[in-house]
Image: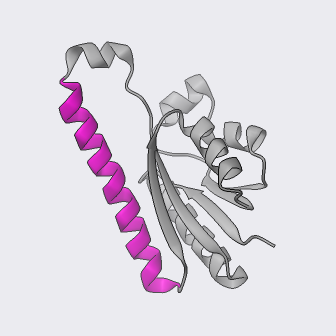
Amino acid sequence: MYKKILVPIDGSENSLKTLDHAAELASVLGSKIALFHVIAPLPSTVQRYVQVNNLVQEVQGFGQEVLEDAKKAIAKKYNLEIETDLIYGDPANEICDKAKKDQFDLIVIGSRGLSEITSIIMGSVSRRVARHAVCPVLIVR
């Protein structure tokens, strides 16, 4: 039923719990799993006051580390085909676009990520993904 599962992760404790849930599901179903990290653009006010190049490199390095650590964590426990991808953009939009473009059957996403304050102001990423995704969305608490 679910042959390709997209798992957006941000390095938060909740996304790691979500990852384990998704990996177990993929293992039972014989699914492929894709770990996906989206780097949100910096606000223009921040860009004015910091050296953007250094910060972008640091954030990208963090994203790569999150993906590699997550891949290692589930590769030890489960025998899965795992791919990783990192992209810049609005997290909810990029997750929905990737699910559509790469024809994923399921998105497994955490209910909360790194930025709970931002989600109060802008609405949670998981809620926006659930509303706009072209495939089913499993939100893990």
Q: For residue 141, say whether it is visible.
A: no
Q: Residue at x 29, y 18 (%)?
A: 47
> Is residue 96 shown left or right of residue 69?
right
Could you tell me residue 134's position as x and y percent? Answer: 78, 47
Q: Residue 19: x, y in percent?
A: 54, 65
Residue range corresponding to the magenta coloring: 51-78
**Magenta run includes residue 70:** yes
Q: Residue lying at the far right in this picture: please name it.
A: 1
Residue 17, given in percent of the width and then of the height, sits at 53, 64
* Quadrant including the N terminus: bottom right
Q: Quadrant of residue 31?
A: bottom right
Residue at horizontal 36%, vertical 50%? 63
- Predominant SS of the magenta segment: helix
Residue 104 spot, x, y in % from top left: 70, 59
**Would residue 59 be seen by someone viewing this image from the given angle?**
yes
Residue 102, compared with residue 34, is above or below; it is above
Decide if residue 76 is on the left or right side of residue 5: left
Q: Is residue 23 left or right of residue 100?
A: left
Residue at horizontal 57 percent and vertical 62 percent from the top: 18
